[in-house]
Image (tube, rainbow, N blue to C red):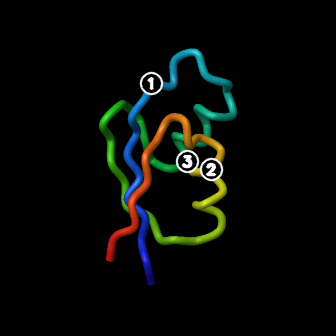
Amino acid sequence: MPRLKVTQKRSEIGTKPQHRETLRSLGLKRVGDIVVKEDRPEIRGMVKAVNHLVTVEEVE
């Protein structure tokens, strides 16, 4: 199953509380943090909600 590498590129300071909660749900705590998640619709939705704060790459 494909996986997504999600990297936090911008700070959560000044963002909406929902965006901060989404970053925490993804496992991101600070700028530069990287997590690898399974490519599922739930994860895609979370990434889409905070796409201005993260970058995403598909990995094997």
Q: Which mark is residue 25?
A: 3
* Total tally of numbered discs in the picture: 3
Q: Residue furthest bottom?
A: 1
In this rendering, would 60 be left or right of 4? left
Q: Nearer the viewer, residue 24 or 49?
A: 49
Which of the 4 image quadrants contains residue 21? Answer: top right
Q: Label 1, on which residue?
A: 11
Element assignment for label 2: helix
Q: Label 2, on which residue?
A: 48
Q: Position of residue 13 (x, y in %)?
A: 52, 18
- Asked if the residue at tag 2 contacts the one at tag 3, i.e. Cβ–Cβ closer than 8 Å, the answer is no
Question: Is 23 above or below relative to 36?
Answer: above
Q: Give the crowd class for mark 3: few <14, some 14-19, many >=20 residues within 10 Å.
A: few
Q: Which mark is residue 39?
A: none
Question: Is 59 above or below relative to 31?
Answer: below
Q: Residue at x 51, y 25 (%)?
A: 12
Q: Could you tell me the amino acid type at mark 3?
A: Ser
Q: Decide which of tag 3 and tag 2 comes sooner along the chain.
A: 3
Element assignment for label 3: helix
Q: CA distance from mark 3 to mark 1?
A: 15 Å
Q: Decide which of tag 2 and tag 1 comes sooner along the chain.
A: 1
Q: Decide which of tag 3 and tag 1 comes sooner along the chain.
A: 1
Q: Give the crowd class for mark 1: few <14, some 14-19, many >=20 residues within 10 Å.
A: some
